[in-house]
Amino acid sequence: MKKIGLYLFTNDLRINDNTLLYKASQSVDELLCVAVEPRLSTYSVRLSQEQENGAHRHLFIKQAIDDLASSLARLGQRLLVLERNTSEDLVQLVKSQQVTHFFASSHCAHDERQLVIDTLTQCPGLFISQQHHTTLFESDAFPFELTKLPRSFTKFRLQVEYLEIEIEESVISSLPPAPQTATECYRKPIPELNDSKPGDYIGGETVGLIHLENYFSNDYAGTYKQTRNALDGIENSTKFSPWLALGCVSPKTIYRHLKQFEAHLGANDSTYWIYFELLWREYFYWKCLTLGTSLFGRESSDLPNEQLLDTTSGSSFAKWKSGNTNYPIVDACMRQLNATGYMSNRGRQLVASCLIHELGIDWRHGAAYFESQLIDYDVASNWGNWAYIAGALNPQAPQNVNKQRAAHQSQLKSRHFDLVKQTEMYDPEHAFINKWHRGDEASTSTRYQDVI
Ligand SMILES: Cc1cc2nc3c(=O)[nH]c(=O)nc-3n(C[C@H](O)[C@H](O)[C@H](O)COP(=O)(O)OP(=O)(O)OC[C@H]3O[C@@H](n4cnc5c(N)ncnc54)[C@H](O)[C@@H]3O)c2cc1C
């Protein structure tokens, strides 16, 4: 009997360092390559008050999928893109194409996992291969059970940072052909990326790998720790996140380049710090997996029926989104996000702190808006960082409630940023504020008396 495989691309839109695709290539006679275009969830539509992904995020995803389709075409394959992320289309494909083997990345997030579970439940008898292959570590490499994932990043880091990372890459030089019968639904090749402007980030594995090579062929990594907090500047932090988020480049590929850089030019605090930040990404990934829907605050009762904001908060939220709060540093960062789809890590911390503490808005609205706009939107890193800043990452255990409440208050305080001091530290000359200046006096004042 013919073995027909279906490979479902989700957050692994790449050919290189794709061990699961390699496995698929070795296991079946014909292979159906399918991608599901990420859409804004209903939950995030309500919270963000946006109907769909923003233009930059939308374009970046489209470019990444087109690039994958071109790479697959070079290997004699074709990519079928499903526009709805429901199990119906997948089930229909499995049945109509008589698929026998199903391959999909093991996602950390609830909805993406549910899509695969629902499909497999309706298609019993498939051979299933799943793997976490958008991380540095496999879950069985950890010296703890996932159910006992350390609560804090520091405890996690101390237990994992010395673990060995497998960096040998599987090379795919050919793929089994696509089944003949599914032709009408394939993605039409769109080879030219002519809808992006110079300086824009371009989605896809091809550009992601070029960016990686460029980054390490300069000495940026050697000074990363001193420059990473800058609000702007392509060279100041790695800017790997957009390609990591869609899996166009794997963290292991980045790690391999980092080790090569250290071997040639020497390791220092800065090169270690790139690894340190990748461990934050890792921590949020496994945290997301273990928290399930509670990462999104779905089980809590303080946003009844996921209600929308009242008129006053709704107006503050709209001003925050458009960069019109009258906190100059916040407005500049939000304008940068809206104009490019990217914001620095420092900027994200400041605008999140402002939304939560200055404007008193539930953090989930901010997280959902980021989800709709960021070209590097990553479910675990985004919702994890927001929950962390809001002090909502670790659900409180019933014992030691008082002790935990005190710890919670002090955490909240430590993540409430003084916007004036932060401006003095990170934008003393107001170069960044002026760059994203909205053209009236209020936006260049740092005194903030007239805030909403
Ligand atoms: C409120 C908020 C929301 C965020 N949302 C996202 C998101 O949706 N997607 C995303 O990739 N990152 C998110 N981050 C983390 C961080 O801001 C970005 O990863 C970083 O700014 C990306 O730029 P870079 O690649 O130049 O980072 P670098 O400073 O060069 O770091 C190297 C890599 O380490 C990882 N990393 C760095 N900082 C963090 C962090 N705090 N948490 C997790 N991983 C980290 C990223 O993969 C990054 O590419 C968020 C942070 C905050 C405070």
Image (cartoon, grey):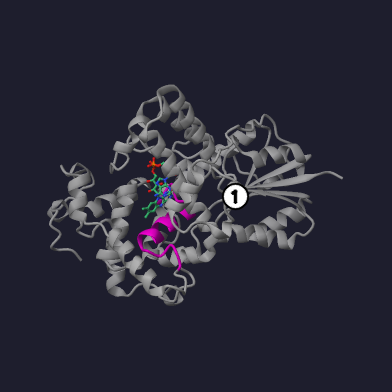
Residue for point 46% across, 76% down: 305
Q: Is residue 426 magenta?
A: no
Judge whether residue 49 can be spotted in this image. Answer: no
Looking at the image, residue 187 sits to the left or right of residue 350; the answer is: right
How far across and down, in percent of the image, does residue 26 sit? 74, 37
Residue 330 image position (x, y, % from top left):
25, 54
Q: Residue at x 71, y 53 (%)?
A: 93
Q: Residue at x 30, y 74 (%)?
A: 311
Judged left or right of residue 137, residue 95 is right
Q: Which residue is mark 1?
A: 139
Amino acid at the residue labelled 1: Ser
Label 1: which secondary element: helix
Residue 418 can be seen in this image: yes
Q: What is the quadrant of the N terminus in the image?
A: top right
Q: Is residue 256 left or right of residue 346?
A: right
Q: Is residue 382 magenta?
A: yes
- Name the residue rendered at 15%, 42% in the picture: 429
Give 134 or 48, whichever is nearer the viewer: 134
The magenta segment is 374-395
Q: How many numbered marks are there?
A: 1
Residue 70 x/y as whole percent: 59, 35
Q: Is residue 238 above or below residue 315?
A: above
Determine whether, in the image, residue 87 is placed left or right of residue 357: right
Q: Where residue 286 appears, x then y in whole percent?
A: 53, 54
Quadrant of the frame with the C terminus: bottom left
- Nearest to the observer: residue 48 or residue 362: 362
Q: Residue furthest top?
A: 264
Q: Residues within 10 Å of mark 1 (few under 14, many from 20)?
A: some
In this rendered view, identify the residue nearer to me: 42 or 403: 403
